[in-house]
Amino acid sequence: QVQLVESGGGLVQAGGSLRLSCVASGRTFSNYAMGWFRQAPGKEREFVAAIGWSGGITYLAASVKGRFAISRDNAKNTVYLQMNSLKPEDTAVYYCAAKMVAAVADLTRGNEYDYWGQGTQVTVSS
């Protein structure tokens, strides 16, 4: 089992920044690719960003490319989502997720992930 705990959400004005953190425990963190997803009220969960086990490969959704960045610190069992130039449409609950490293995987698909955190609310005011 892997336990994931997100933090860093909050209320911010449009144009502002937040950094989300997700701390993992329970298994060897570097055995897992990590992802961030979000879900706004009345909408489906959507992919935001993902990062490979070593941090050498990253993926970003088109809607956040150039504004968000994902990184990880395996020594701290933590994955980060740096969010800059926030927009009201970024308002959502943000979830981190962990996927056991596999030879083939589509890290943009939520169904690929094995473990999920409880989420942290991000609200961007206009």
Image: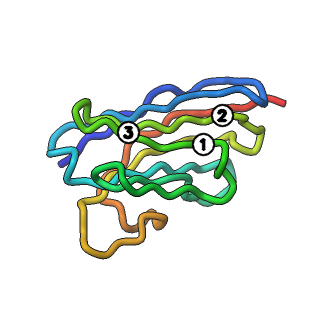
Q: In the rendered view, tell whether residue 65 sits above or below residue 17.
A: below
Which mark, by number, is residue 84? 2
Quadrant in the picture for residue 24 = top left
Coloring scheme used: rainbow
Alpha carbons under labels 1 and 3: distance apart: 13 Å
Q: In the rendered view, tell whether residue 62 sits above or below residue 122.
A: below
Position of residue 100 measured from the top left corner of the image (x, y, whole percent): 24, 60
Q: Is residue 28 left or right of residue 55?
A: left
**Quarter of the image containing the C terminus?**
top right
Q: Is residue 59 left or right of residue 41?
A: left
Position of residue 92 measured from the top left corner of the image (x, y, whole percent): 63, 42
* Residue that appears at 54% across and 58% down: 47
**Circle 1/circle 2 CB separation < 8 Å:** yes
| Mark sitting earlier along the chain (1/3) | 1
- Callout 2 secondary element: loop
Amino acid type assigned to the residue bearing label 2 in the image: Asn
Amino acid type assigned to the residue bearing label 1 in the image: Phe
- Callout 1 secondary element: strand
Instruction: Give the labeled residue for mark 1.
Output: 68
| Mark sitting earlier along the chain (2/3) | 3
